Image (tube, rainbow, N blue to C red):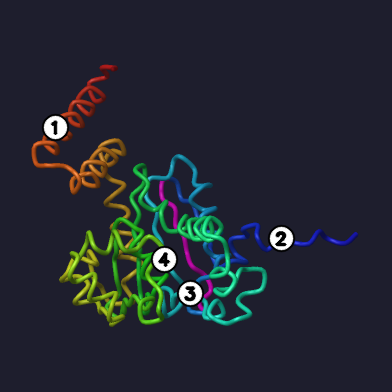
């Protein structure tokens, strides 16, 4: 009997360059195509989206890491050719699509980059070597970033006549401010570990050999606090930029009231 053909549009994590490991309340997501410097494709994005949808509810912290010398060299360059990637729309086909179809396609790509900010999770990216374009934006999708001393971030889209469209512009601006975000994107220059930590892009920089251990230590520290307290604190901090000082004080009071009543076993 002939085995049924595999639908390339159906995510297959290992085939598409993603590995998921669950260890209790910690999930480890690994980009696992080091021979291609973890270059990204729509297939990889579908796999990452599937990971976010399939995570058990017990998971509290997600660690994103990558095999090889580079976190991700960015978009697979085949996407820039007239032929594109077999089974995927090329840039020329995307450009020729109707507005609604084009918008929906890009929105589908963005799904791989957005679930990392879910309120019930804290996500940590361990980033080494090059994190370019889509790789930079994937790291920006996480709540926290630990980087190796050899890290090199760059947002090359503008240099190619495009814009960063994988949900990276908001977190980048939130982290480093409008003027620096514009300069980083418009010039496409490299941002190394020392600068990344100085401007708030990275939480911690360590020697490359210590990256995995440092990221796992941070994950363990995040898991040490009670889950509901972390969720409430994350929500307070995520919403702070959109609230006035007095509105934030009100939000703090409401969150603390929920925590006090929960700890005391008093229902709503």
* Magenta stretch contains residue 244: no
Distance from the alpha carbon under mark 4 to that under mark 2: 27 Å
Q: Which mark, residue 195?
A: none
**Residue that mark 1 sits on:** 250
**Outermost right residue:** 1
Front of the two marks 4 and 2: 2
Residue nearest the viewer, comparing 126 with 141: 141
Q: Which mark, residue 65?
A: 4
**Residue that mark 3 sits on:** 75
Asked whether the beta carbons under mark 1 and mark 3 sit within 8 Å of each other, the answer is: no
Give the magenta part as a residue range.
Answer: 25-35
Front of the two marks 4 and 1: 1
Q: Earlier in the sequence, mark 4 or mark 1?
A: 4
Dot 2 crowding, Cα within 10 Å, few <14, some 14–19, many 20+: few
Dot 4 crowding, Cα within 10 Å, few <14, some 14–19, many 20+: many
x, y percentage for residue 164?
A: 37, 69
Residue lying at 66% horizontally and 73% vertically, measured from the top left: 86
Q: Earlier in the sequence, mark 1 or mark 2?
A: 2
**Residue that mark 2 sits on:** 7
């Amino acid at each position: 009997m002939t085995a049924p053909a595999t639908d390339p549009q159906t995510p297959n994590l290992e085939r598409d360059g993603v590995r998921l490991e669950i260890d209790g309340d910690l999930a480890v997501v690994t980009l696992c195509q080091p021979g291609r410097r973890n270059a990204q494709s729509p297939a990889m994005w579908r796999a990452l989206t599937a990971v976010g949808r399939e995570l058990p509810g017990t998971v509290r912290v997600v660690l994103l890491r990558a095999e090889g010398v580079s976190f991700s060299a960015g978009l697979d360059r085949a996407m820039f050719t007239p032929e594109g990637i077999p089974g995927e729309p090329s840039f020329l086909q995307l450009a020729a699509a109707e507005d609604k179809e084009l918008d929906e396609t890009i929105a589908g790509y963005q799904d791989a980059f957005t679930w990392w900010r879910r309120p019930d999770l804290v996500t940590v990216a361990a980033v080494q070597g090059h994190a370019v374009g889509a790789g930079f934006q994937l790291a920006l999708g996480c709540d926290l970033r630990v980087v190796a001393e050899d890290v090199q971030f760059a947002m090359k889209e503008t240099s190619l006549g495009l814009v960063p469209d994988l949900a990276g512009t908001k977190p980048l601006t939130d982290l480093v401010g409008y003027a620096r975000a514009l300069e980083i994107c418009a010039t496409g220059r490299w941002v190394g570990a020392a600068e990344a930590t100085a401007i708030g892009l990275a939480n911690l920089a360590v020697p490359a050999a210590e990256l995995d251990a440092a990221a796992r230590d941070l994950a363990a520290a995040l898991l040490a606090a009670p889950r509901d307290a972390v969720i409430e604190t994350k929500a307070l901090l995520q919403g702070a930029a959109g609230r006035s000082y007095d509105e934030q004080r009100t939000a703090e009071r409401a969150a603390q009231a929920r925590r006090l009543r929960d700890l005391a076993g008093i229902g709503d």
